[in-house]
Amino acid sequence: MPDPVKRPDEGPVPQPSREIVCIACPIGCRLEVRAAGRAAAPTGTGDEATVTGNRCPKGEVYGREELLAPKRTVTAVVRTDSADFPCVPVRTDRPLPRERTRELLAELCRMKVRLPVAAGAALLPDWKATGVTVLVTRSLPPQEVPAPG
């Protein structure tokens, strides 16, 4: 399904209706989420949409957020200075607004981590004042063989 239409100086405009599969719990309900109106903008209250098809309260919260202000947990790998371990896995400690994920991934792509590094280390604390921290998810020992170039 296409991304919401963006207008100058505004956030995404919610689509009038979407069908999604809920991932908030193991049931996997098929949700239908309807925006209250085309001009409705996210205000953080979650009252701008109606959700049907959910079997638990988590589905209602997930459906509203997915329509009005979608967020994603970002996982990636970052280059290291080691030939033995050329990449280290990383992830965000909480979901990031979906429209910022490409920007974060581009920054991670430009980075190079110096070994050793410990799991849980904050690679990018409070990235761009979003409250999201990028964490290393695997401990890697010091390099034994330097990476070429």
Image (spheres, rainbow, N blue to C red):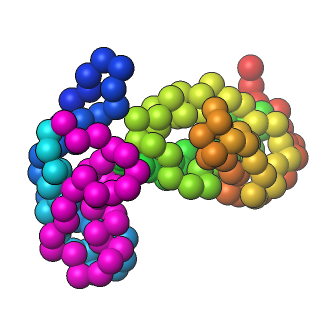
Quadrant containing the N terminus is top left
Q: Nearer the viewer, residue 111 or 97?
A: 97
In magenta segment, residue 54: yes
Identify which residue is drawn at 47% across, 37% down: 101
Instruction: Give the x, y percent position of residue 97.
Output: 45, 43
Instruction: Give the x, y percent position of residue 28.
Output: 26, 74
Q: Is residue 40 above or below residue 46?
A: above
Identify which residue is drawn at 29% across, 40% down: 41
User: Is 110 situated left or right of 112 in this image?
Assistant: left
Identify which residue is drawn at 16% across, 51% down: 36
Q: Is residue 135 above or below residue 28?
A: above
Query: Which range of residues does the magenta coloring cover?
Result: 39-68
Q: How many numbered circles are shown?
A: 0
Asked whether residue 86 appears in the rendered view, the answer is: no
Identify which residue is drawn at 33% across, 63% down: 62
User: Is 100 situated left or right of 67 in this image?
Assistant: right
Instruction: Give the x, y percent position of residue 94.
Output: 56, 55
Displayed quadrant of residue 79? top right
Quadrant containing the C terminus is top right
In magenta segment, residue 1: no
Displayed quadrant of residue 108? top right
Instruction: Give the x, y percent position of residue 57.
Output: 32, 77
Asked whether residue 143 appears in the rendered view, the answer is: yes
Displayed quadrant of residue 38? top left
